[in-house]
Amino acid sequence: MAWLALALYLLGLLLAFGWRTLAQWRSTGDTGLRLDAGPAGTLRWWAKLLFVAALVLGLGGPVAALAGLSSPAGLDHRAPHVVGLALTVAGIAATLAAQLAMGASWRVGVDPTERTGLVTSGPFALARNPIFTAMATTSLGLTLMVPNIVSVTAWLVLVAALQLQVRAVEEPYLITTHGDAYRHYAAGVGRFLPGLGRLRRT
C-alpha cells in the first residue's frame, strides 16, 4: 500500500502542478504561477511556508512507511486503507477538475496587483475553494493509506496552510478586487464545503 500511496502522491503532484501549469501556458501564454511569498513573517509568507512544508511531509508519509515506520493499530487494517485509496483517487480527480473549471483565471498563489475573472460556476457553485477541498481530501486519503505520524502531520499542516491562505490572503484579495460581486457570491456559497463558512451580508 505504501508504494501505491507514493505513486498516487507523485501522480497528483504531476497533474496538479506540472500538467496543469503546462496546459495553462499553452492556452494563455502564462503559467499561472504566482510564487512570490511576500515579505518574511507576513501571513502570506507563513501560508506559503506551511504549504511547502505540507507537500514535503506528504511525500514523507509513504516514504516513512516504506522505511518501516509503524502505523497505529486501529488504522492498520484493510478497510481504512481501501477508504483511503478511494479518497485519494477521488481527490486527485476532483483537484484537476476544479483547476480546469477555473480556465484562464487559474493561479497558484496571489499577485495583489492582478485582476482575474471571478469564477462562480461548476464546482465553484458548491464551494468557493473546491481545489483546496479536493487537495485536503487527497491528503486525508493518503493518511488512511499509510497512517503514520508523518502522514497525519502532513494532513494537519496542509489544512492549516489552506485555512491561512484562504482567510488571510485570498479572501481579502478577492474582496478588494471584486467588491460586492464577491461578497454576494461568498454570502451564498460555503468556503470549503456547501453551506459552511459563508460570509455575512453587509
Image (cartoon, rainbow, N blue to C red):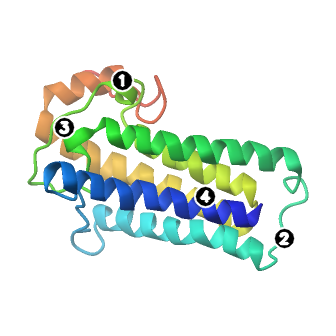
Mark toward the viewer: 2 or 4: 4
Residue tagged 1: 125
Report, in whole angstroms, how far the alpha carbon at label 2 lies from the one at label 1: 41 Å
Nearest to the observer: residue 32 or residue 201: 32
Residue 95, percent from left and from top: 46, 44
Could you tell me which residue is drawn at 27 percent across and 42 percent down? 171
Q: Nearer the viewer, residue 84 or 128?
A: 84
What is the quadrant of residue 37 in the picture?
bottom left
**Separation of marks 3 and 2 at Cα, in angstroms:** 46 Å
Secondary element type, mark 4: helix
Mark 2 surroundings within 10 Å by alpha-carbon count, few (fewer than 14), some (14 through 19), many (20 or more):
some
How far is mark 3 from mark 1, CA to CA?
A: 17 Å
CA gap between label 3 and label 4 equals: 36 Å
Name of the residue lying farthest toward the bottom: 67
Q: Secondary structure at mark 1?
A: helix
Front position among marks 3 and 2: 2
Kindly identify the amino acid type of the residue bearing the numbered disc 1.
Answer: Ala
- Residue 8, numbered circle: 4
Q: Earlier in the sequence, mark 4 or mark 1?
A: 4
Is 10 located above or below residue 186 in the figure?
A: below
Amino acid type at mark 2: Ser
Quarter of the image that includes the C terminus: top left
- In percent of width and height, residue 130 lies at 42, 37
The residue pinned by badge 3 equals 175
Using a 10 Å C-alpha cutoff, classify the residue at mark 4 as few (fewer than 14 neighbours), some (14 to 19) or many (20 or more).
some
Q: Position of residue 187 (x, y in %)?
A: 31, 22
Which of disc 4 and disc 2 is earlier in sequence?
4
Q: Which one is nearer the viewer's eye here, 108 or 149?
A: 108
